[in-house]
Amino acid sequence: MLNGDVTMKIETVENRKGRNPDRCRSRNGEGRSRHQDEEEIILSNGDKIWYHASYHFPDGHLRAMTDGQRERMRSERAAYRESQGRPARQTTQTTQHRRWIGSE
């Protein structure tokens, strides 16, 4: 009986091919959901990524963005916050804090 249970578990794992193969499937059948106005941008290191102001990017992608791409993201996010009646973020404190941490 125990041997049969073990065999059953192995077959189940092999048939699934991962913990949940449907977890990234969106309603439109593609591998991920998309914003209508997202676009593919090329970073300074040559990598291509999908960009939308609401996306969260890892530090490596943020560092590889050009100054113009980062400024565009900041302005689009600020415009959204303003349209929602939210206060503007205080980026000067964050920038100074990051410089201070980086100087150690």
Image (cartoon, grey):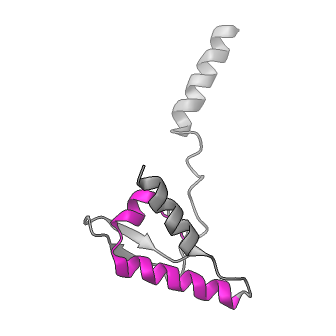
Rendered position, 68 above or below 97? below
Left or right, 68 with respect to 36, comes to left
Residue 101: horizontal and vertical position, in percent? Answer: 48, 54
Magenta segment includes 67 = yes
Residue name at image x 59 percent, y 44 percent: 20
Rendered position, 98 above or below 15? below
Residue name at image x 65 percent, y 14 percent: 4
Residue name at image x 42 percent, y 54 percent: 102
Residue name at image x 26 percent, y 64 percent: 45
Image quadrant in which you'd find residue 92: bottom right
Magenta segment includes 3 = no
Towards the viewer: 53 or 104: 104
Residue 28: horizontal and vertical position, in percent? Answer: 56, 71
Rendered position, 49 above or below 74? above
Rendered position, 100 above or below 73? above
**What range is drawn magenta here?**
55-83
Tally the marks. 0
Q: Is residue 56 visible?
A: no
Towards the viewer: 26 or 104: 104
Principal secondary structure, stretch drawn in magenta = helix
Residue 68: horizontal and vertical position, in percent? Answer: 36, 82
Towards the viewer: 66 or 97: 97
Q: Is residue 49 visible?
A: yes
Q: Which residue reaches farthest right?
A: 85
Left or right, 47 with respect to 9, comes to left
Residue 17: horizontal and vertical position, in percent? Answer: 51, 38
Image quadrant in which you'd find residue 82: bottom right
Q: Quadrant of the N terminus?
A: top right
